[in-house]
Amino acid sequence: MPLFTAPVTTPEAPAPPPVEVPEIGYAAITYVDPTGTRWPMTDLTADWYTLAEGVSGLGAAPYTLTSDPHPRGGARLRHVQAQPRTIVWPVLVKGADHTEFTANWRALARAFTRTLREGPGTLEVARPDGTVRTIAVYYQQGWDGRGQTATGITWDSAVLTLWCEDPYWVDAQAVTVHREAGTQVDYLVPYPSVSSSQVLGATTVTVPGDVDVWPEWQITGPASAITFTREDTGDAFTLDMTATPHGALLAGETVTISTDPPRVRSGTGENLIGGLNWPAAALWSLPPGTTPVTFQLDGAAGGSAVDLTFYPRYETA
């Protein structure tokens, strides 16, 4: 059967060549443990082999459907809830002798199980066209030998179960939308003119991918209040900087608003979430496709800017 391998490498090491992977076709797979160490899994010269036969869980996310009986028969769908994903990952480990095999077995076991203590690892799926999708994984179970004659001496295999709290694959490349205020003009130079202190205005945001994204916003001052509106739904939220201990943003100062989880931090780390217009504030998501939005910065001047950042999310690898 085809095999993929996984030696430990430095972050600067070149990506292994793509091989055929069940459910997704040709790709190069890399596991990144919580320390940032990269373990390529398609290098056929190494001592870690991911067995192609038995890999599963790389396709579409699992869902739970909630329905209500319909009086005329059948049912009507009421709610759809994405569920955590489980990935099955068979691995063969070997060594030139028992000492080398044991070292390899222990090192790879530690790379996966440390996710339970230090935070998730990451599976990266790189395609020949240069695109990369990732998913955060936790070790759940399966790092056990086969327990058969001749195993555990110079080779053995394990069938890992990796648990993913977010079932969607995430693009490794962020998408950023930048909007910046132009230089304000003098009222009398060269002739009477008016510059609004509410700038940036309406724009359209295009989201690639399959499911909603929850963006992060970074605002650069000067600005006294910031309002973001999703025009197709009317959802909006306002951050009134004058209602926070920080006060209005001065030129060059920043504040970052995260929509999932809800969080507002100044550039120096101050917690400013109390400045949001609760309970009316709706920290909205962006669906796939194009969405009309409005950025409004009160008290803006030349240099005021908004940077909207998100990572496209996908059903499959």
Image: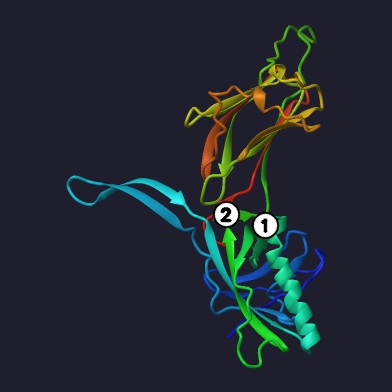
Callout 1: few (<14), some (14-19), or many (20+) C-alpha neighbours within 10 Å?
A: many
Percent of width and height locating residue 282: 54, 30
- Residue where numbered disc 2 is placed: 165
Q: Nearer the viewer, residue 211 or 73?
A: 73
Check contact, mark 1 vs mark 2: CB within 8 A.
yes
Residue at image coords 62%, 39%: 261
- Residue where numbered disc 1 is placed: 120
Query: Which element type, helix, strand or loop, lies under badge 2?
Result: loop
Please indicate whether residue 24 sits to the left or right of residue 258 in the image. Answer: left
Residue at image coords 61%, 85%: 147
Residue at image coords 58%, 38%: 205
Callout 2: few (<14), some (14-19), or many (20+) C-alpha neighbours within 10 Å?
A: some
Q: Is residue 31 visible?
A: no
Please, is residue 307 above or below residue 207 in the view? above
Distance between mark 1 and mark 2 Cα atoms: 10 Å
Query: Which element type, helix, strand or loop, lies under badge 1?
Result: loop
Percent of width and height locating residue 119: 69, 55
Q: Is residue 140 visible?
A: yes
